[in-house]
């Protein structure tokens, strides 16, 4: 039994959250939340205190593990970024021991940022993908992960015949999907339509359906990428049309970026309940564009947030959430005439970081909420003391904009303390 004490911030919807001071959260030995209340009697290990806050752990729904130690390399177009940074970073994963070292440092980094769930891409190497899953299992991270799939328009050393890639992916999925009490999941991960043959994409869709796995891929990342897809698939209207034709738009599909999406594409995403992962820091870093979150959300798109490491330079998800708010403001004030729409507020940022992100990953019934019966994925932070002096309605916003990774004191996943190391 563990007891967490502090002010509990619990997002309830994109516009509402509750803030309860002097709250006690009790975690059972099986890693579930047993009780949320105000009982001061200590039980088991006690952490936190009156000046701490208890938050659901953050959810990062798009990032690339092999790029963990390649953050912040600026100055390239998306195409150059792939050639100079992404492909060489992935090619290193032919060395399984090196892959393991990078996976360890990745887990330290995301947990140190208060992230308890990731949906991450691996390298196009089966052995390294197994090894990274072993690291997640040992370290206690909640992860959706997959071997990168690509067989056209990519370097030879990162490619293989479609059948071989699909066999390997199926074998990894069979071992890891649902492992560790469901904490680990597999995602079939076609890189993006331009880098995948029809055979590879159709095979990934069929296997994902058969095994009940996730699918993750990139869509509408920039105008250049969309044009390139049109050249590869001239019979299709756009990225989303290609994915729909290949069977890749499902309730368990995570589409990264979606900067360039028109009305019809948006409609198809809503119809299929596909999740769009908004990566605002990466979209700006690579000059891909400013994604119109407000318009997509109004249309009913299901959203999660992604750090998009390493085209996004920052793994600390509150910074990504702030970038989501700032991007919406930039689009609003820069439009001529100025747009009238309401931009998202701090409540929506907290929602996307926690419960909303969990729902978008179809795990909202297990994590993202601090209530009895949920798996205990939560963090304890110590905000700057002046935040407690603010009117209660200003506190969550102030915390969002000022929280730093070094203020995270404890990270629990499924009730187990997993960090941070600092
Ligand atoms: Zn990506």
Image: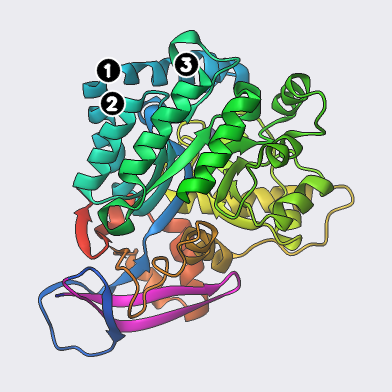
Find numbered disc 3 in the image and state the secondary structure of the residue it sits on.
loop
Where residue 179 appears, as percent x and y from the top left, is 29, 51
Image quadrant in which you'd find residue 101: top left
> In this figure, which residue is indicated by the disc labeled 3?
160
Q: Residue at x 46, y 72 (%)?
A: 395
- In the image, 407 versus 112, the foreground residue is 112
**Label 3 vs label 1, nearer the camera:** 3
> Where does residue 418 sit, x and y in percent of width and height?
21, 54
Give the CA distance from mark 3 to mark 1: 17 Å
The magenta span reads 2-29
Determine if the magenta segment contains residue 295.
no
Nearer the observer, 243 or 321:
243
Image coords of residue 78 (percent x, y): 61, 23
Question: As rendered, which of 281 and 367 lies closer to the eye?
Answer: 367
Against 17, residue 298 (above or below) is above
Q: Give SS at disc 1.
A: loop
Q: Quadrant of the N terminus?
A: bottom left
Q: Are marks 3 and 1 in contact (CB under 8 Å)?
A: no
Does residue 79 appear to the left or right of 397 in the view shown?
Answer: right
Residue at mark 1 to residue at mark 2: CA–CA distance = 6 Å
The residue wearing badge 2 is 99
Q: What residue lies at 73% left-to-right and 24% top-to-bottom?
A: 224
Crowding near pointer 2: few (<14 within 10 Å), some, many (20+)? many
Circles 1 and 2, Cβ within 8 Å, touching? The answer is yes
Residue occupied by mark 1: 95
From this view, report whether residue 353 is shown above or below residue 231: below
């Amino acid at each position: 039994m563990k007891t967490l004490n502090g002010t509990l911030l619990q997002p309830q919807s994109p516009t509402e959250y509750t803030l309860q001071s002097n709250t006690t959260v009790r975690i059972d030995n099986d890693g579930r939340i047993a009780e949320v209340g105000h009982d001061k009697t200590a039980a088991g290990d006690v952490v936190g205190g009156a000046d701490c806050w208890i938050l659901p752990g953050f959810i990062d729904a798009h990032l690339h593990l092999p790029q963990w130690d390649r953050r912040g390399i600026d100055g390239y177009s998306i195409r150059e970024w792939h050639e100079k940074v992404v492909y060489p970073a992935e090619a290193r994963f032919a060395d399984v021991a090196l892959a393991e070292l990078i996976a360890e440092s990745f887990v330290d980094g995301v947990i140190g940022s208060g992230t308890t769930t990731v949906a991450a891409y691996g390298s196009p190497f089966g052995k390294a993908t197994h090894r990274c899953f072993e690291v997640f299992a040992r370290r206690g991270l909640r992860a959706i992960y997959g071997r990168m799939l690509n067989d056209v328009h990519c370097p030879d050393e990162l490619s293989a015949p479609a059948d071989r890639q699909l066999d390997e992916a199926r074998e990894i999925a069979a071992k890891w999907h649902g492992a560790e009490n469901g904490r680990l999941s597999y995602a079939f991960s076609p890189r993006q339509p331009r880098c995948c043959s029809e055979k590879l994409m159709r095979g990934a869709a069929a296997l994902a359906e058969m095994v009940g796995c996730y699918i993750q891929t990139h869509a509408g990342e920039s105008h250049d990428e969309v044009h390139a897809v049109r050249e590869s698939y001239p019979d299709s209207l756009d990225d989303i049309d290609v994915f729909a034709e290949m069977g890749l738009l499902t309730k368990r599909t995570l589409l990264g970026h979606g900067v360039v999406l028109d009305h019809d594409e948006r409609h198809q995403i809503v119809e299929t309940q596909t999740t769009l992962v908004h990566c605002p820091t990466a979209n700006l870093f690579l000059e891909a564009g400013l994604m119109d979150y407000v318009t997509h959300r109004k249309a009913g798109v299901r959203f999660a947030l992604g750090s998009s490491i390493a085209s996004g330079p920052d793994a600390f998800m509150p910074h990504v959430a702030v970038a989501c708010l700032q991007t919406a403001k930039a689009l609003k004030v820069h439009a001529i005439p100025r747009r009238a729409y309401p931009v998202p507020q701090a409540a929506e940022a907290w929602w996307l970081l926690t419960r909303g992100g969990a729902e978008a990953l179809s795990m909202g019934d297990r994590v993202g909420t601090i209530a009895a019966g949920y798996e205990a994925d939560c963090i304890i932070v110590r905000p700057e003391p002046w935040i407690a002096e603010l009117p209660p309605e200003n506190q969550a916003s102030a915390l969002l904009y000022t929280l730093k990774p070094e203020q995270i004191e404890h990270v629990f996943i499924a009730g187990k303390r997993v960090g941070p190391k600092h």
